[in-house]
Image (cartoon, rainbow, N blue to C red):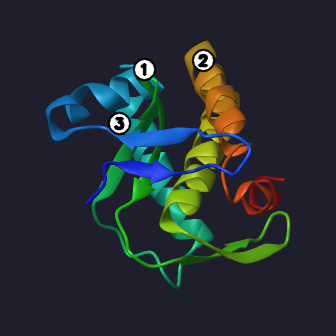
Amino acid sequence: MSNAFATHDTSFHALATRVPDARRSRFLPNLFGRRHLLVAEACVYSFMQWLSPADYAGGYWHFLEQNGLPLYLAPAAPSNFRICCRTNGYEGELTADAAGIVATLFAFSHLAFEIGDDQLSESFHRLRDHAGRHGEAAKIFSAID
């Protein structure tokens, strides 16, 4: 199985790479900051449950990075997720990778306003930039708009 998720369109090759098991313990503190990592991780999972109650029932998640910088979490699921965002009316189907981006962006946004930490804002913008180059960018942005 490949360690890279192809998250690109034909004009730009941006790969998000799975974090190896040996570095997973450092991923969450680097992404969310040590003070917020437990709350932030739980927030991502909660947003996934809220966005996809019919399809998401917990499980193992991949941690993804680009060029050594942490980006997002994605469910390690082979199937797509039906996403329904009650706050903006979006309904659609996303791959597990794209659904993870959406859930992580929701968590960053929520926590950045709730906590006001610059690291969370920076991580949000880095992931949002990456999402713009993702093969499902239009769906991702529709879901988070």
Q: In the displayed structure, would residue 96 be above or below residue 122? A: below
Q: Residue 32 in the image: x percent, y percent? A: 46, 27
Residue at 74% of width from left, 44% of height from top? 11
Q: Quadrant of residue 99?
A: bottom right
Disc 1 marks a residue whose amino acid type is: Gly
Depth check: give the residue in front, 111 or 32: 32
Q: Which mark is residue 38?
A: 3
Marks 2/1 in contact by CB < 8 Å: the verdict is yes
103 vs 96, left or right, is right
The residue where tag 1 is placed is: 33
Q: Nearer the viewer, residue 105 or 36?
A: 105
Q: Which residue is mark 2?
A: 117
Which residue is the extreme one toward the left? 22
Label 2 – label 3 distance at C-alpha: 15 Å
Which residue is found at the position 67% from the left and 44% from the top? 131
**x and y percentages locating residue 103 in the rendered image:** 57, 54
Q: Residue at coordinates 62% horizontally, 14% vertically from top-left?
A: 118
Q: Residues within 10 Å of mark 1 (few under 14, many from 20)?
A: some
Earlier along the polypeptide chain: callout 3 or callout 1?
Answer: 1
Q: Residue furthest front?
A: 10
Q: Position of residue 114 (x, y in %)?
A: 65, 31
| Label 1 element class | loop
Q: Nearer the viewer, mark 3 or mark 1?
A: 1
Sequence-wise, the earlier of marks 2 and 3 is 3
**Within-10-Å neighbours for mark 2: few <14, some 14–19, many 20+:** some
**Mark 3 to mark 1 CA distance (whole Å):** 10 Å
- Residue at 74% across, 43% down: 132
Residue 112 against residue 75 in the figure, above or below = above
